[in-house]
């Protein structure tokens, strides 16, 4: 196992120490576009590992880390820890102008962390943009999320800036929470729809486990 593969496996194991809720059904995508990417260098075991890690990090941002006392958010606001979900609830009920301004500032911070988190996936997806657009469209349609901002994000032109579009359209924690959920669901669907890449990842994981038994 090379250095990159070891790094991926270590990252995934670290993520499993922060359990999160993910109570959703998985959709196996049926697009023929899967034949163009599954098991290829565009979507192999290493990419599966990266996607799994990114998905878990998104879920931690959304709902926090599970503890004995419930879920612990990862974002500090006014001396307390919040998740994107609890920040959305706070934002919805907020009437204080000063607190609203503070929430706008923390939203900027949280969005920047999200952008950094998903950057490896965006970079990888650019090389197979057309198949990804089809797969995202199918996932959103079958989940009845045809109005998802994820579709706008996926259909951006080659010269468009994903960051500018993201920052323009994600204007509240409520909108951000829905966007994160749509992306997390799509990533789960994508992983479950690529058996060749999953098999490669499982082989990498078993190899890593065998090496660390010694």
Image: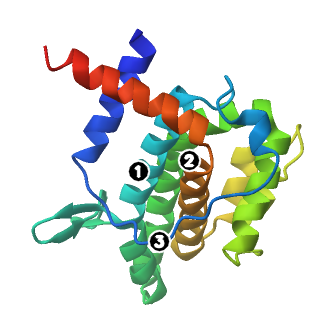
Q: Is residue 16 above or below residue 175?
A: above
> Can residue 148 be seen at all in this image of the molecule?
no
> Label 3, on which residue?
24
Would residue 163 be found to the left or right of residue 71 on screen?
A: right
The C terminus, quarter of image: top left
Residue 18: x and y in percent read: 25, 51
Q: Residues within 10 Å of mark 2 (few under 14, many from 20)?
A: many
Can see residue 193?
A: yes
Numbered disc 3: secondary structure? loop
Q: CA distance from mark 1 to mark 3?
A: 14 Å
Q: Nearer the viewer, residue 107 or 74?
A: 74
**Residue bearing mark 1:** 56
Residue that mark 2 sits on: 191
In percent of the image, x 31 and y 61: which residue is there?
Answer: 20
User: Which residue is at a point 52% across and 71% down the rendered structure image?
Assistant: 173
Q: Nearer the viewer, residue 165 or 209?
A: 209
Q: What element does badge 1 sit on?
A: helix
Q: Position of residue 201 (x, y in %)?
A: 46, 31
């Amino acid at each position: 196992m090379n250095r990159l593969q070891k790094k991926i496996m270590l990252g995934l194991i670290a993520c499993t120490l922060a359990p999160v809720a993910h109570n959703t059904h998985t959709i196996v995508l049926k697009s023929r576009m899967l034949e163009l990417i599954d098991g290829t260098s565009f979507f192999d075991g290493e990419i599966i590992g990266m996607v799994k890690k990114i998905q878990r990090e998104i879920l931690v941002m959304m709902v926090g880390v599970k503890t004995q006392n419930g879920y612990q958010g990862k974002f500090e606001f006014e001396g307390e820890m919040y998740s994107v979900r609890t920040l959305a609830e706070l934002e919805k009920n907020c009437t204080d102008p000063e607190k609203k301004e503070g929430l706008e500032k923390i939203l900027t911070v949280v969005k920047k962390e999200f952008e950094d988190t998903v950057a490896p996936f965006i970079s990888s997806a650019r090389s197979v943009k057309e198949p990804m657009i089809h797969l995202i469209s199918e996932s959103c349609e079958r989940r009845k999320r045809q109005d998802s901002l994820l579709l706008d994000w996926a259909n951006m032109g080659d010269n468009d800036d994903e960051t500018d579009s993201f920052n323009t359209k994600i204007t509240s924690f409520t909108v951000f929470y829905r966007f994160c959920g749509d992306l997390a669901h799509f990533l789960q669907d994508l992983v479950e729809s690529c058996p060749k890449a999953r098999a490669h990842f499982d082989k990498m994981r078993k190899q890593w486990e065998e090496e660390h038994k010694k």
